[in-house]
Image: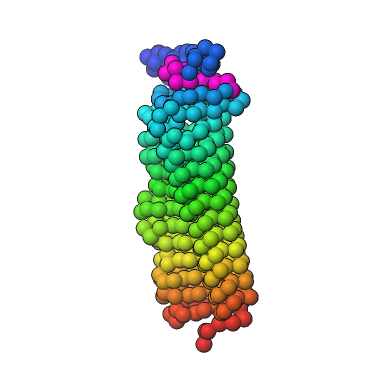
Amino acid sequence: MKLTSTRSLVPLTALLLTLGAGALQAAQLKVPQKYPTIQSALNAAQSGDVVLVSKGTYHENLFFHGIGVTLKGKGKVLVKPVTDLPVIQFHQSVDCKIVNIRVDGQLTSIGIKVNSVDNVLVKDCRIDHAGGIGIWAELGVGARLLNNVIKQTDGDAIRLRGSSATVKGNVIKDATADGIGVEGTLHTVEGNEIERATKVGIRLPTEESSQNLIVDNVIRDTAMIGIQTESLTVGNTLMGNRIEGSGSQAMIVYGKGQLVTGQQIKQSGSEGIFTNADLSSFKNNKVKKSGKSGIFLVSGSSIKVTGNKVRHSAMDGLSVYGSFHSVVQNSLKNSGQLDLNAVSTNTTYLGNDYVTTNLP
């Protein structure tokens, strides 16, 4: 008969007792009933505690630290800064949460800053009038920015660095720069609504912006570009986004190995999709009413263009420059100039549906 050593049970029992004690000690720290300021409650909070803030206006800059602390508003809670520091700042904290807090950022450059911390949740918050960036999640892992409303920022509404963040269900309006800036890897940007960004709706700006998923976002009325990947980005997936009313291109796709599929693009001031992204794939996109070409392969090599539907382009439906591309089973109709402008002669053209072309 095999005997179990009692030695192995002792540390396990101690661990369970410690965890149980921690759960029992978790508390609600109420503001202003028990603590006069939000910061005083945050300073007193221990792991698992909830700082519960009653409705009202609080004139503070908040500094978030610790592990597993939640800041939650009850009713309309508005935080206004008293200095030009971020209104709320996370630093050296893990697994902390902010829920249902409103931020007025007129005096500051950043509404909420998540600085080098992991697994932070910012949910159901509202940020108005940030003097710079609305939410900046910098260098950490696993930030979750969910269902927030961000309006009238003087910089990007949301800026990401680090890795594995989830940005989902946010409403962004009137950002003076970009709606969402995505640096880093393995981020998911999903189901956000972005309106009237002055520059780009969603931008992937650097070589660090690789292997990200940009999916099912709605981008309307950007002054310049709907979605842009810059030249050193690699391996991003852009899927199922809807882009309407871009002042310039709906999409600019540079870099290498990008997958662009299922976009719905309408009424761009210039090209619907403009690209030179080597080894990339453009598949099953719908492009209508582009101010210039619907899809323009300006250069590059080994780009696959398959199953796209392009209608009512002011110039060409599909313009193909560069080399060694594959252009297969696209439907190109009602173009102002050529449905298929096949400048690249060492490209495979197969099974496309068009009326006008310069193919021999």
Q: Position of residue 168 (x, y in %)?
A: 54, 42
Whether residue 203 appears in magenta in the rendering, the answer is no
Q: Against 24, is 113 above or below?
A: below
Q: Position of residue 259 (x, y in %)?
A: 49, 59
- Please tell me in which quadrant of the rendered image residue 314 appears: bottom right
Horizontal arrangement in the rendering, residue 245 relative to residue 320 (left or right): right
Pick whichever, 225 or 65, lies toward us. 225
Point 55% across, 51% down: residue? 196
Whether residue 43 appears in magenta in the rendering, the answer is yes
Taking the view exactly as shown, the residue that stands out farthest to the bottom is 360
Point 36% across, 58% down: residue? 232
Q: How is the image coloured?
A: rainbow
Q: Position of residue 43 (x, y in %)?
A: 42, 18
User: Does any portion of residue 82 appear in the rendered image?
Assistant: yes
Point 38% across, 30% down: residue? 91
Q: Tell me where the magenta segment starts and ends, as one range.
A: 38-55
- Please tell me in which quadrant of the rendered image residue 306 appears: bottom right
The image quadrant where one finds the N terminus is: top left
